[in-house]
Image (cartoon, rainbow, N blue to C red):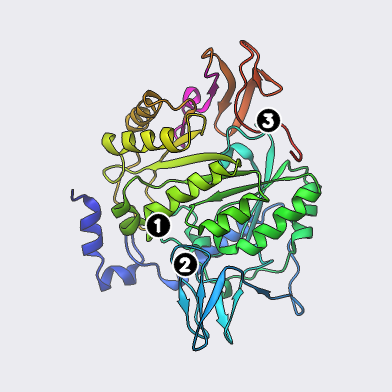
Amino acid sequence: MKTSLDKEEKGAGPADRKSGGPGSALSRRRFLAGSAAMIAMGMAGIPPVRSGPGVPRREASFCSGPGGGAVQCLLCPHSCTIPPGGRGKCGVRENVDGSLYSLVYGRPCSMHLDPIEKKPFFHVMPGTSAFSLSTVGCNMTCRFCQNWQISRAKPEDIEAGYAGPDEIVERALSVSAGSIAFTYGEPVVFFEYMYDIACAAREKGLRSLVVTNGYCSIEAIKKLCGRVDAVKIDLKAFDDAYYKRICGGSLKPVLDSLVEVRKAGVWLEIVYLVVPTLNDGRGEIGAMSRWIISELGPDVPVHFSRFFPQYRLTNLPPTPVSSLEAARKICIGEGARYVYIGNAALAEAESTYCHACGRMIISRKGHMVTGTEMSGGKCNHCGAVIPGIWREGKG
C-alpha cells in the first residue's frame, strides 16, 4: 500500500536537503543547535559532570577480530565489520588499532529526574521518580525519532564530561530517585556504561530500568537481564518491511529480545507507536496482540502511544484518538489484561484495572498517579495479585 510517505521520500531532492525543511536532511548548523538545546534542557537541575584530561577510555564488549585489522561488533544485529579508524552504524563504537572502543562510556549528554510513568512504566513502583540518562547514538534510524538531537549526534558534536558509574548512582541517591532509567537515546549503544551503572545501583539498593528499541544481540540481552529490574521495549510495528523502511532495522531480533527478557523473569512492558497509514491496520494490531499473548502471556502491559509529526516524518497527521481506542480494544479482545493509551490525555485509558474484578486500582492523569487501591501488590477490592514491581529496593 502506498502512503504519503512515498511522496515525501521521492520529493526530497537537493533543494529540499539544503533548506532543512520538513522531510529533508537537516543542516549541520540546525542539527547542532537542536542538539545543544536538547542537551541543555536535559541537564536542567543536575550539576554538570567533570571534563578534562585523564578521562578513561573503555574497550567495548561483544566483538571479534575478523582479521586485517578489522573488527566485527556483535552487540546488535547489524554485526558491523569496522575497519581501522571506522565506526559502526551507531556512530559511537570505533576501531582503534584493531580494538573496538566505546566513545561514550562515562559521557552522559542528558540527565534528568522524571516520573517513572513517563518512561512509560505503569507496573513498576508507581508515583516514584527515575533518574534518567543517556549518551548520544542509536543503532536505528527511525524517521519519527522524538530524541533525534541525541540519537543522531556524534560524540564529537557535544561537550560531555565524565561521570563514572558510582557517580551516577550517587547523583540518583542525592535526588531521592527510586531507580535509574537508561532512556532518551538508545541504551544498547552504551551497553558497557549501562551495565556497570546497573551493577553499582544494585549494590546501593536502586533499581535499574531500560527503555530500548530491543535491537540487541541475544547474548547482550541475557547479560543485561542479569543486572536490571525492568525493560520497556518499543515494538515499532509487526511488519518487517516497516522496520526496514522506516526504522533501519528488522523485526525478528526485536521479537527475540522480547521473548528473552520475559524468559529471564525481568519485568517487561511494551510500547507501540501507532503511526497513521503505516502501522495502524487492524489486521496488524490483531496479529501483534495474538503474538504477545501466545509468546509473552497476558500480563505484559501494552501501551499504544499517539504519534505526532516530527523529525523526518512530518507530513502525517497525529494519530486519531479513535485509532488508539480501536487498537486497545483489539488487544484486550485478544486476551491482554493491561492495555494503555499514551500521549492522548485519556485518564481512563491511562489507569490500571484489576484483571479479576475490573475495579480501578491505580488512577492516573498524564504522568501523575492520582490514587491507588492496592496494598502489597494486591487489589484492595478482591485481593487478586497484580503483576508488577510494587516496592523500591532490591529483590
The quarter in which the C terminus is drawn is top right
Nearest to N terminus: mark 3 or mark 1: 1
| Depth order, front residue of 380/290 | 290
Residue 320, x across and y down, in percent:
33, 34
What's the distance in space between the residues labelled 3 and 1, CA to CA?
33 Å
346 in the magenta segment: yes
Circle 1 is placed at which residue position?
142
Residue 287, x across and y down, in percent:
32, 37
Q: Quadrant of residue 245?
A: bottom left
Q: Which residues are magenta?
A: 340-355
Compared to residue 381, the image places residue 342 above or below, namely below
Residue at horizontal 38 percent and vertical 52 percent from the top: 251
Residue at horizontal 64 percent and vertical 21 percent from the top: 371
Residue at horizontal 77 percent and vertical 78 percent from the top: 54
Circle 3 is placed at which residue position?
390
Circle 2 is placed at which residue position?
31
Nearest to N terminus: mark 2 or mark 1: 2
Residue at horizontal 55 percent and vertical 77 percent from the top: 94
